[in-house]
Amino acid sequence: MDTRKVLCVEDHPGHLRVLTRLLDAAGYQVVTAMTAQQALDLVRQQPVDGILLEYDLPDANGASLRSELKQIVPQIPVLLFSGVGQQTPILIRFFDAYLRDSHMRNSLPDALAG
């Protein structure tokens, strides 16, 4: 299986380290951004398979950034979250399942055609 690349957008360095470590442990290659503008630049420069997106960023809110990201890559799975805490490992498991489900849903027509 190819390693999937995800973008993790979080403006708190400590939270970003925790999320990156958990995503890495789940088998993802992780690229990071700490602002909405960095996230937009990264998505324009390199393909990613999914985006984990903090709702409260210094230069935008997650909902508006999600809309902008979807204009660039309409099919990209984006999961909004707020804060890091005891729920974070569950969030990462949910994100992993969400990406796998999105990948299966997108490849299903190809599998049926073959």
Image (tube, rainbow, N blue to C red):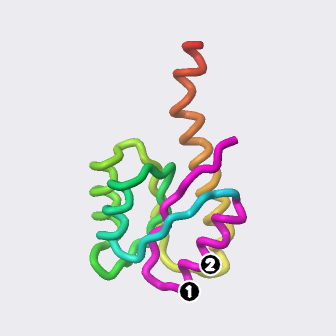
Q: Looking at numbered disc 1 in the image, what kind of residue is underneath it?
A: Gly
Q: Is residue 76 above or below residue 109?
A: below
Coordinates of residue 4 in the picture (x, y in percent): 59, 50
Q: Which residue is mark 2?
A: 18
* Residue 96 locus on image (x, y percent): 63, 54
In three-dimensional space, the C-alpha distance between marks 1 and 2, rounded to whole angstroms, equals 6 Å
Is 17 contained in the magenta span?
yes
Range shown magenta: 1-26
- Quarter of the picture holding the N terminus: top right
Question: Is residue 11 depicted above or below 75 in this figure?
Answer: below
Circle on res. 2:
none
Q: Do the residues bearing badges 1 and 2 touch, measured as CB atoms within 8 Å?
A: yes
Residue depicted at x 35% and y 75%: 35
Q: Residues within 10 Å of mark 1 (few under 14, many from 20)?
A: few
Q: Residue at x 55, y 54 (%)?
A: 5
Residue picked out by circle 1: 14
Q: Is residue 10 left or right of residue 66?
A: right
Q: Is residue 84 magenta?
A: no
Which amino acid, by three-letter code, is at mark 2? Val
Q: Is residue 82 above or below residue 94?
A: below
Picture coordinates of residue 55 (x, y %)? Answer: 40, 72
Secondary structure of the residue carrying tag 1 is helix
Between 82 and 12, the residue placed more toward the observer is 12
Toward the top, the furthest residue is 114
Between 85 and 27, the residue placed more toward the observer is 27
Residue beneath the point at 31% across and 64% down: 65
Q: Residue at x 34, y 59 (%)?
A: 66
Mark 2, Cα crowd under 10 Å, few <14 / some 14-19 / many 20+, is: some
Q: Residue furthest front?
A: 45
To which quarter of the image does residue 80 belong? bottom left
Quadrant where the C terminus is found in the figure: top right
